[in-house]
Amino acid sequence: MNAVFYLLASCVLLCSTTSFANLLNIDPESVEAEAWTILDSQSGQVIAEHNSHVQRAPASLTKMMVAYIALKDIQSGKLQRHEMLTVTPVINQVMSDESQMRLKVGEQVSVDTLLAGLIVMSANDAALVLAERISGSVPLFVARMNSEAKAMGMHNSHFSNPPGITMPDHYSTAADFALLAQALVNETPSYLYYSKLPDFRYQGIYHAATNILLKTDPSVDGLKTGFTKAAGYNLALTAQRDADRLDAPTRRLIVVVLGTPSIQKRADVAHKLMNLAYTYTQNERIIAKGQHLADIPVSQSKYTWFQVKGIQSEVVTTSLYPLTTPIDLNSYQANQQRLYVKNAQGLMQIIEPLSTTKTQVQANSKQPVLNAPLNQKMPLVEIKVYQNKQLLRNIQVENHVQLEQLNVFQQFMAWCHDLWHGIQRKANIKL
């Protein structure tokens, strides 16, 4: 009986991952924001954070969820980008001092224009018109906002209105908005078309983009600003830059800062956090698409081995910061893209990022043998990635295993074959 691979393994492979410790130890006293986080959108790892799970008023960052739902419905065909909507009295809920497109009841406006007004101008009337069109009413849309947040893992968020008006039961966190930003760039990347627009014009209204980094950094293409007296100045920021890697030529980071004191400060803090992370972290490929990960022995089936392959590339974010001391964000020089510290002689010394990292990969089979019959999803391989003995990621490779069982005579013949040839099959990890 010759060894045969079960080929479905390479077609339906799934990976679930868990990320662990922060990579960069940034002194929170050096960051002028009440809460913040830095997330790598490709690995899903948190690079650094502070108060990121503390519930706060999100202000107009709320509109990121409105746009996410609208763009999902456009992708599924439930909503059309160039569909013309008739404005209803729902806009009468908007107060005169709120940001708005000044829509009028009975007016015709396209979904595309509403999305631009929502994201660039942060128009509250645009949020309400979209909400009513998508769900039939604002309360039903708010219910969907909370449902989407729950499904996304935004466990410390609750929405009470689409525009982001301050209410006691309307709150979120920096960590949750980083998850939402990750979903926007990965699942509905057309959001970035709107968020990188330099301005918005509609029937005599002109509004310059409030994300001032769009003018100074060409790699920045989103995501959303927000402000209320209760929230302070908020910013969800993303950028994509060259990574000089053949398997991943670009790299995207996400930064969320909440509760900064001014428009300029939220931009400065978010940009410095992002530049620091680009300089002192990198992504390393752990699994390549199609890579042979493991062979697991099969019993009581016509197949003797189940071959596990990677269906997509998996990366891990590692630290390039060479010191163990906390990082003072104020010592990061934007023009040099480097940190400076005082040496023993009191002179300023450049901290160069590491050229290599001591990353270790540990892979184990979760199943010593697969006994037919089987028709279920199950964990097959666990991959743990360490740097300096610190666990960075835990990747659980799962697969739907479908194996038919041999009849009693065939099982007996297979047992005799293995006994005669002294074959003892064990899981073989290739990684």
Image: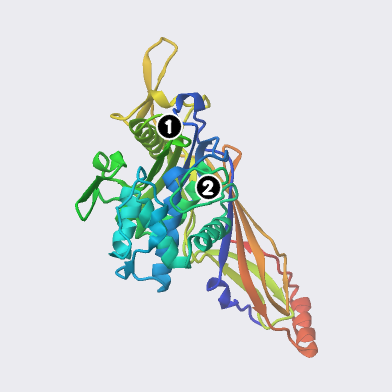
Q: Is residue 170 above or below residue 267?
A: below
Q: How is the image coloured?
A: rainbow
Is residue 282 something one can see in this rendering? no
Q: Is residue 32 above or below residue 282?
A: above
| Residue located at (30% from left, 63% from top) | 112
Residue 149: quadrant of the picture: bottom right
Residue 54: quadrant of the picture: top right
Foreground of the two, 250 or 100: 100
Foreground of the two, 215 or 17: 215
**Percent position of residue 425, x then y:** 71, 69
Q: Regarding mark 2 in the picture, which secondary structure is present there?
A: helix
| Residue located at (58% from left, 59% from top) | 16
**Percent position of residue 370, x then y:** 71, 72
Check disc 1 and report the residue beneath it: 260
Check disc 2 and report the residue beneath it: 176
Q: Regarding mark 1 in the picture, which secondary structure is present there?
A: strand
Label 2 packing within 10 angstroms: few (<14), some (14-19), many (20+): many
In primary-sequence order, the first of circles 2 and 1 is 2
